[in-house]
Amino acid sequence: MNAPRTIRLTELSHGGGCGCKIAPAVLTEILAAAPIRGLPAELLVGNETADDAAVYRLSDSQALVATTDFFTPIVDDPFDFGRIAATNAISDVYAMGGRPIFALAIVGMPLDKLPLEVIGRILEGGESVCAEVGIPIAGGHSIDTLEPIYGLAALGLVHPDHVKRNSSARAGDVLVLGKPLGVGVLSAALKKGRLSAAGYAAMLAATTKLNTPGEALARLPGVHAMTDVTGFGLAGHLLEMCRGSRVRAEVRFDALPVFPEAVERARDGVKTGASERNWKGYGAEVELAPGAPAARELQQVLLTDPQTSGGLLVACSPESESAVLAEFARGGFADARAIGRLAAGEPRVVVR
């Protein structure tokens, strides 16, 4: 009798993780056709600058942070998929400077393709991350879908004075990135059977590491803006910061933290379709560093690589750089480093 076939979650989805996001240019067109009207004064952060979460003032000392994030599998292990998806969703609360308080589950599963025990393991993975944070999954919603989908609606609290937008950066600020780049490349390599066990372990460790320093970073006076790097890649989310803040970014490519195996696989031609869509959407606003075609191709792939549960991107005064790096170090983010700075000028990303 033949043994039952092992289910690979990534085979059930057309994309994976935050690489499933709608392309930047298409999303802009969709949102432009559906303007939001009647915004209350209590809504401190809405959709105007493509920020990480909405923030609603409850009182002079308290505001509610609300966000939702979900996607199709980036890995094959159900428990790991649940952990990554939950970590990614909660990250948006930390990116606004908030403290998570509870979550709601978003579940879409192909019931004709996945055994109930596999679905249960996905939910267990998400619940384990919420337990690590110390918050409950207080409810949610589930539907029968063609592809596996899992994520959370996450809610948190923040003092109104400590809200960190992606649009409040200043010329002269230093840019600090908390996690290494290359998750999209590694996930593409996994799907092709070209990712080593060590590469998988490194990807899993990063994508399940909660961006908890965000709450403390938001209280540092020298921290002016924050966002987390996800599906639009470093260049895309940095451009959102530049557009909202009306500054330009200068990035030192050699200073970027990157998974070593992601560099190797990218040089072998491994990349995601989302990376190409990202470049088509905003490549005209990115100036790559001079060099040989292969070197520029590597820059493009890593800068546009969709990050699932990526790192915090912080804009801070030069005087606060050491304090920001120390806060990341306290949280165990050994790869955090300064990657460039902001300057006056037309919003764009210039790579050195």
Image: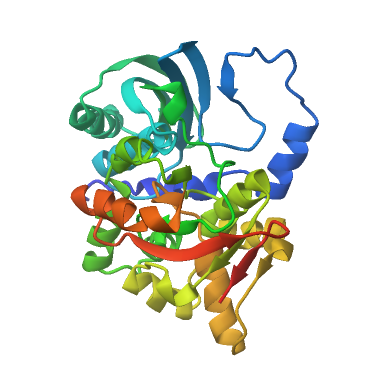
Residue 115: horizontal and vertical position, in percent? 30, 32
- Residue nearest the observer in this picture, 110 or 169: 169
Q: How many numbered markers are drawn?
A: 0
- At a point 25% along the width and 28% down the height, the residue shown is 130
Q: Is residue 293 visible?
A: yes
Q: Which image quarter: residue 281?
A: bottom right
Residue 267: horizontal and vertical position, in percent? 46, 80
- At a point 53% along the width and 56% down the height, the residue shown is 233
Q: Determine whether 160 is above or below 214 in the image.
A: above
- Residue nearest the observer in this picture, 173 or 45: 173
Q: Which image quarter: residue 37?
A: top right
Q: Determine whether 29 is above or below 40 in the image.
A: below
Q: Is residue 268 visible?
A: no
Residue 102: horizontal and vertical position, in percent? 32, 19
Query: Is residue 157 toward the left or the right of residue 47 in the image?
Result: left
- At a point 49% along the width and 66% down the height, the residue shown is 340
Looking at the image, the residue that sits furthest to the bottom is 292
Residue 27: horizontal and vertical position, in percent? 69, 41
Q: Which image quarter: residue 220?
A: top left
- Residue nearest the observer in this picture, 346 or 208: 346
- Pick the quarter of the image with the C terminus: bottom right
